[in-house]
Amino acid sequence: MQTKIWFGLACWMGGMLLLGACGSKPGSEEEPVREVETKINLAKAPEAQADSAYAFVKAQVDFGPRVPNTEAHQRTGDFLVVQLKKMGWDVSSQPFEAKAYNGTLLQSRNIIASLNPKATTRLLLAAHWDTRPFNDKEAKDSLNFVPIDGANDGASGVGVLLEVARVIGQSAEKPALGLDIILFDSEDYGQPENYAGQWSPDLWCLGSQYWAKNPHREGYSAYFGILLDMVGAKNAQFYREGYSMQYAPSVTKKVWQIAQQLGFGKYFIARDSPTIIDDHYYVNTLAKIPMLNIVDYDPQNAESFFPAYHHTRNDNMKIIDKNTLQAVAQTILQVIYQENAELANAE
């Protein structure tokens, strides 16, 4: 994923990152949350294709690690712009220079695609498209500075959004509400594990911080946003992340309910997880747009939040599952068409 800083419910104290120290811990042995919910009358939505979403993920990985300041990064960005334009979306780039934790200047660009740009009611979808420049969770120190493929941590969220953009672009019944897809850059260039220097969560998620302070359109706002990060692994589990429940609780619960009604309850678990610093945190706190995060969570590894492949060379195409990608893409499409139908009914 991106800057998955394992900051969920955490405080940095005495040089240690303590999960749960600033809030409640997720109970991995607890029963799923039982909530009284009125069944949603689901609107008709077009269907996502698992093979297509998978192909979009593989196409990114085939370029090589998308680390800022590399040729693979440049070529991947160009590819994403071309694909979104082919799908009929209005596309622009937001170039910026960001300073990494070690002083490296990262030549970066956020990629923004919009549908119905004049619509005032908008929904924001996002993912990060860069990859981790080092595999700093590997067991052997000699391997810690090898860039990773980032098949799940980066490419999966972008692949799902490309599939959503493709399906909507080809649909005979396009939504009337405004849609914006933002692919954030330089999310995953934060401090390595066991970094001896000054640590700060703000040295991650550089693209979302830049966009939140410099939106692509003056006065931009959205009804709500959805961030996708690490959404393609086999047997992925998406718990309701802490900041999502803090800043966008009603929307988060609604998305999970829609996913469960679609039959994806094995992925979308009705339990809460710790908070993590991710791109959605800055959209919530700086841009003031309520945004939730769909992100793979390992309840058996709560102290680090993420599954074992995170920030290692094992984050490659071998862990990507077409069924997971399809479940997330279909859920996003359903949310879009659900909001569109409710907007039409309210007018």
Image (cartoon, rainbow, N blue to C red):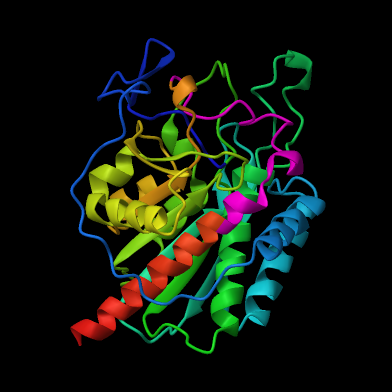
Residue at 42% in and 68% down: 334
Residue 314 sits inside the magenta stretch: yes
Asked whether the viewer can see residue 129, the reply is no
Above/below status of 317 relative to 30: below
Question: Could you tell whether 170 is left or right of 274 in the image?
Answer: right
Q: Quadrant of residue 143?
A: top right
Question: Could you tell whether 94 is left or right of 21 in the image?
Answer: right
Quarter of the image that includes the C terminus: bottom left
Q: Quadrant of residue 124?
A: bottom left
Question: Could you tell whether 89 is left or right of 40 in the image?
Answer: right
Q: Position of residue 279 (x, y in %)?
A: 44, 48
| Residue found at the very far top of the displayed protein | 14
Asked whether the viewer can see residue 152, the reply is yes
Q: Which residues are magenta?
A: 303-326
Q: Quadrant of residue 108?
A: bottom right
Residue at 47% in and 51% down: 264
Quarter of the image that includes the N terminus: top right
Q: How many marks?
A: 0
Residue at 70% in and 15% down: 139
Residue 208 sits inside the magenta stretch: no
Report the front residue among 186 and 329.
329
Report the front residue among 47 and 98.
47
Above/below status of 249 relative to 197: below
Look at the magenta stretch and give its main secondary structure.
loop
Report the front residue among 84 and 314.
314
Q: Position of residue 20 (x, y in %)?
A: 32, 21
Q: Position of residue 162 (x, y in %)?
A: 61, 66
Above/below status of 17 relative to 327: above
Q: Position of residue 166 (x, y in %)?
A: 61, 75
